[in-house]
Amino acid sequence: MDVNLTQEGSTARFAVNGKIDENGAEELKTRFMGLHRKNLQEVIFDFRNVSHIGSAGIGKLLLFYKELAVSGGNIRIINASEAVRDLFRVLKLDTIFSIS
């Protein structure tokens, strides 16, 4: 898995390439924890090149959500494949995250 991370003001964007397995989830966590989170209000995950997300990746997204929700922030997942969107729907995560 490869991640391109940018942060401008109160928004951070993760462009993720590859499968988000256990190692990939830890990489996302390391990168997330390295953000300037004091004024962070929105984190966008671009899943254009993500074919699979495992339970570890979903767990990390929920951790990030918890961290952001305290200050009114949110997470958006964009360019998700149909399979990833279906998984999020089945797990009811589409009620927590904005997914497109």
Image: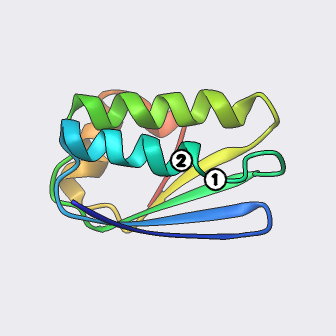
Q: Is residue 13 above or below residue 67?
A: below
Image point (37%, 27%), residue name: 59
Q: Nearer the viewer, residue 45 or 87?
A: 45
- Whole-percent x, y for residue 15 in the image: 40, 69
Q: Nearer the viewer, residue 33 or 92?
A: 33
Q: Which of 49 and 7 is in front in this view?
A: 7
For mark 1, give the secondary structure.
loop
What distance separates the C-alpha of mark 2 from that of mark 1? 5 Å
Q: Is residue 85 above or below residue 4?
A: above
* Quarter where residue 44 is shown: bottom right
- Whole-percent x, y for residue 14 in the image: 47, 63
Residue 32 - label: 2
- Mark 1: give few (<14), some (14-19) or many (20+) Cα within 10 Å: few
Of the 4 image quadrants, the one containing the C terminus is bottom left
- Report the side of 96 relative to 53 (left or right): right
Q: In this view, does 93 lie above or below 46?
A: above
Image point (69%, 37%), residue name: 68
Tell whether label 1 touches label 2 (CB within 8 Å).
Answer: yes
Residue type marked 1: Leu
- Whole-percent x, y for residue 96 in the image: 55, 34
- Report the side of 21 relative to 9 (left or right): left
Residue 3 - label: none
For mark 2, give the secondary structure.
helix
Of the 4 image quadrants, the one containing the N terminus is bottom left
- Residue tagged 1: 35
- Mark 2: give few (<14), some (14-19) or many (20+) Cα within 10 Å: some
Image point (17%, 54%), residue name: 19
Residue type marked 2: Phe
Image point (58%, 34%), residue name: 65
